[in-house]
């Protein structure tokens, strides 16, 4: 019931809410400010999943847990990253654009890195899934709801303005419930493997944020742009990772569930640190116009 109905519905709610905050300009920004968006997306779509491979290897995770960590690392940024970027006074427009584009790119990146991880870590999961079915699943549980949200915003902008804050709270509630359900359903396995899973998740989270922020600054992006990029790397759409994982093997959900607990703590501390540093000029919240 949870895998077949509740998880896809929760993810759909989250993706529709993301769509309510987007316009075509958010996708066009890659041509307007290509350097910031390009560096952010390279970090998000290449550095993050490859870093997940490295961390899983260093911590010698079991095959299923290793694949689950890579699946999480390959997942796009989430709407929470946009909110935390705003709280950190980072470049919210850049954050929203990266979330939008990486969510579309997930149609390719999630199945791609999932397949590579299954082959690399020699798990037995390859016999249980069809990557073609994963592509279709990602399309229907992410792209379709995202487009629905965008269509609603375009058709009813004033109404969307009125309900957006409530919708965002509902989406956050859905995310929390998904994480709790994943932790409860695999509580025994998490307990048995907590030390290595927690260590790997925390290492991935901190390393991804630190490396992406450093790369952005070395590329001479501003602190506010670098903050947005680091947040995108630290706060993934864990619900997508959990939903895809649960349809394959529930044990695959463990890294994403544990990571979700840590990412709010580390990203929150990072937001507090950068809030004063970015105080020179802050963006408004990414709300519908």
Image (cartoon, rainbow, N blue to C red):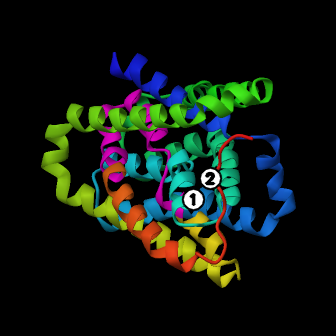
Residue at the image point whose x is 69% and y is 68% from the top: 39
**Does residue 242 show up magenta in the picture?**
yes
User: Percent x, y for residue 26?
Assistant: 76, 48
Residue at the image point whose x is 14% and y is 47% from the top: 191
SS at badge 2: loop
Q: Give neighbour class at mark 1: few <14, some 14-19, many 20+ (Cα, 10 Å).
A: many
State how many labels appear.
2
Q: In the picture provided, is 118 more to the left or to the right than 94?
A: left
Mark 1 touches mark 2? (CB < 8 Å): yes
Residue 2: name its quadrant: top left
Residue at the image point whose x is 33% and y is 44% from the top: 257
Residue 204 appears anywhere in the view: no
The residue that label 2 is drawn on is 285
Residue at the image point whose x is 56% and y is 50% from the top: 77
Circle number at residue 63? none
SS at badge 1: helix
């Amino acid at each position: 019931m949870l895998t077949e109905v509740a998880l896809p519905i929760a993810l759909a709610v989250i993706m529709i809410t993301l769509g309510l905050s987007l316009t075509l300009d958010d996708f066009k920004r890659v041509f307007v400010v290509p350097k910031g968006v390009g560096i952010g997306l390279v970090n998000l779509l290449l550095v993050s999943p490859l870093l997940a491979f490295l961390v899983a290897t260093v911590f010698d995770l079991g095959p299923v847990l290793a694949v689950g960590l890579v699946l999480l690392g390959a997942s796009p940024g989430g709407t929470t990253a946009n909110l935390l970027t705003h709280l950190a006074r980072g470049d919210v427009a850049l954050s929203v654009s990266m979330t939008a584009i990486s969510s579309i790119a997930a149609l390719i990146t999630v199945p791609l890195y999932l397949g590579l991880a299954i082959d690399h870590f020699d798990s037995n999961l390859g016999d249980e899934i069809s990557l073609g079915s994963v592509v279709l699943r990602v399309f229907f549980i992410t792209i379709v709801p995202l487009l629905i949200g965008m269509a609603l915003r375009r058709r009813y902008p004033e109404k969307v303005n009125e309900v957006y804050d409530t919708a965002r709270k509902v989406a956050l509630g859905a995310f929390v419930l998904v994480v709790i359900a994943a932790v409860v359903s695999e509580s025994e396995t998490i307990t048995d493997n907590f030390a290595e899973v927690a260590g790997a998740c925390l290492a991935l989270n901190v390393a991804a944020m630190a490396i992406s922020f450093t790369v952005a600054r070395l590329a001479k992006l501003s602190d506010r742009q670098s903050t947005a990029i680091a947040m995108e790397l630290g706060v993934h759409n864990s619900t997508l990772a959990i939903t895809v994982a649960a349809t394959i093997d529930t044990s695959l959900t463990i890294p994403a569930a544990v990571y979700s607990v840590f990412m709010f703590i580390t990203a929150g501390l990072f937001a507090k640190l950068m809030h004063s540093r970015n105080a020179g000029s802050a963006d408004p919240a990414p709300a519908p116009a």
